[in-house]
Amino acid sequence: MSEQPAKRRGRPRAYDPQVALAKATETFWAQGYAGASLDDLSAATGMNRPSLYGAFGDKQALFSAAIDAYMDASRAAMVRAFTAGGTLRLALERVYRAALDLYLSGEDGGRGCFMVSAGLGQAVVDPVVRDKVAAGLHELDRGFERLVARAEAAGELPPGADPAVLARVAGGMLNALSVRARAGETREQLEATIQATVDLVCGAARDPAL
């Protein structure tokens, strides 16, 4: 009785999905959705097109997964910055500097926020991306609103200050920092912008301990 040839084992995956997604995110971050071709994404991830499709779906689905991965990573850093306590001035400085560390983390220079640099262009034509970008912005709004409300309750804000307006000004500066970082401003220039914004938001805020 002749021996049957041994069954071949399935070929193991030659890639790590998380690593591949991180590489794809870097490519989208640098080139935007429209600028990142499938050839670019294949080269960055080391996966051919059929493997990319099999792992992530089409380009649109891959970009959506990149947004989700970015949101998860940035949320962890920002939650720590928002919840570490201290006066409004200290909290704002901490939040802005945590964002700045992310916005200046590119190997080729400042790249800003992924949602602003890569997400906004696609949000115009893709309602799924638009909803994700809006959700991220609103989540940050709520974080700033909590900071300002806490400062008001602690007696840090001057009489007549409008907490809702101050929160929107504080949140809008994150977007400005992203754009300026992407445009090539140095950390020193961005730090100066942070200081001016903190002074503006806090105004004549007083330290209740004094």
Image (tube, rainbow, N blue to C red):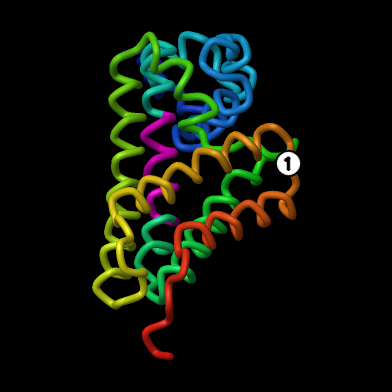
On screen, residue 25 above or below 162: above
Q: Residue at 58% across / 16% down in the picture?
A: 42
Residue 69 is covered by the magenta coloring:
yes
Q: Which stretch did the figure color magenta?
A: 66-77
Q: Please state, as top left, top right, bottom left or bottom right, where the C terminus lies in the image.
A: bottom left
Q: Main secondary structure of the magenta part?
A: helix
Q: Residue furthest front?
A: 160
Residue 59 drawn at (x, y percent):
44, 12
* Residue found at x 32% / y 46%: 141
Q: Which residue is mark 1?
A: 185
Closer to the camera, 44 or 67?
67
Q: Helix, strand or loop at disc 1?
A: loop
Q: Between residues 44 and 173, which one lies in front from this camera angle?
A: 173
Residue 164 spot, x, y in % from top left: 28, 50
Q: Position of residue 129 (x, y in %)?
A: 35, 21
Taking the image as shown, residue 18 lies to the left or right of residue 102, namely left
Name the image quarter holding the N terminus. Answer: top left
Name the residue at 63% across, 51% down.
Answer: 193
Q: Residue at x 54, y 28 (%)?
A: 117
How many C-alpha atoms fall within 10 Å of the one at disc 1: few (<14), some, or many (≥20)?
Answer: some
Q: In the picture, residue 68 is in which quadrant? A: top left
Q: Could you say where residue 181 lies in the image, as x and y percent from the top left?
A: 65, 40
Q: Quick check: 11 above or below 203?
A: above
**Apparent side of residue 151 relative to residue 39 in the rendered image (left or right):** left
Q: Amino acid at mark 1?
A: Glu
Residue 70 is left or right of residue 178, and the answer is: left
Q: Vertically, is 163 above or below 136?
A: below
